[in-house]
Image (cartoon, helix red, strand yellow):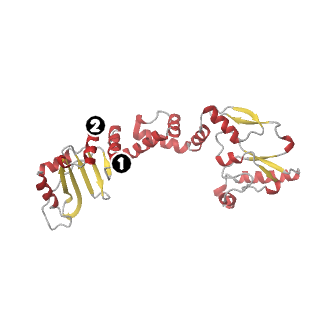
Amino acid sequence: MILTPRNRTYFRKPFPRARGDYPAFFAQQSQKDCFEELDVEKCKVVAALDKHTCPICGKLDGTIIKMSDYEVGSTAPPFHPWCRCTTAPYFEDMEGIGERYARDVETGESFTVPKDMTYEQWKAIQDKKYGAGKVDTERKKVYNEVADKKQFEAYKKRLSDEVPKTFKDFQEFKYTNPEAYKDLTEHYRYKGRVPEATKEDFETYKAIKAIGIRGSIRVPALPSQHAYILEDKSSKRDPAHIMHRMFERNISADNVQNYIDNALFSVKQYKGTRRVFYSKEGVTVLTYTQDYDGIDWIAKTTWSKYDFEETVEKAIQEAIKHGK
């Protein structure tokens, strides 16, 4: 059986990159020499029947190799870095004779099984005993233990009681409840972006996002800031636009500021150069400018609750429903 080009060329790498695999490489080469001296014609790939065995080795367990095809690192172990597989002589008249050891995927206890049981057969038995996917789940826990511990500590620090109490529970949650884990991950990232956000704020954020509000949504809203209303019609950004909207919609300067001060949530748009503040009574849009000394943000436009579009109205109602 020929594996991938990556496996075929792996052992040509410099020693520091493969230092963990040279012992296995030379051991299997010696194994080959031994088999040939004993006139062994065929051998069998043997992988461990436990949760540490990878899918590559698991599928190769029990594979019969002619000695003429024996190639270390390709048709014979090691098949990848840190491979634990080995080989054993194979004789057709010995089929069905003997036993081999296996481990219970849940308890780790060892027990004997028929010698010819393959990894895939052992895996099927364990999955039937403990539930579909059990072996794959336990393997992931082992392989990702170091990274998962760092993640667990980071999540506990940021989200506190919203994370499973123990590392064991965290791994079980991560690998058996994908939808809930995805939500927890999104919450973790959101909390990093909005440190003061509560769990309820995060739920509000998700509800508003689902409605279709575009931009980087923030619950609670960005800190209140002064809405500069300028009448200079020479500006490239036309700040006088807001004066027209205020006149058309009967909105006062106080209203423009109140929409910001009492915002339920805010949204960043256009790579952060526009900020939109949504309140029960109305919306104010600020835009970034470098046209005026000492002024970074000016009021761009505004509208009251009487001019809310359906999407905005739904978003406001969601915010109110979640206690904003």
Question: How far from the left and from the top, in percent, is residue 136?
Answer: 60, 41
Answer with left or right where residue 159 lies relative to residue 167: left
Q: Where is residue 22 in the image (x, y as percent from the top left)?
A: 71, 54
Q: Is residue 14 visible in the rendered structure shown here?
A: no
Q: Report the side of 103 relative to 172 (left or right).
A: right
Check disc 2 and give the amino acid type: Lys
Rendered image: mark on residue 224: none
| View extreme (front): residue | 310
Q: Earlier in the sequence, mark 1 or mark 2?
A: 1
State which quarter of the image contains the N terminus: bottom right
Q: Nearer the viewer, residue 188 or 19?
A: 188
Query: Along the line of sight, which residue is nearer the eye, 309 or 193?
Result: 309
Disc ID at residue 193:
1
The three-letter amino acid code for the residue at tag 1 is: Arg
Query: Where is residue 5 drawn, in percent x and y?
Result: 67, 60
Q: Name the residue under label 2.
A: 321
Q: What element carries label 2?
A: helix
- Spatial separation of the CA atoms under disc 1 and disc 2: 23 Å
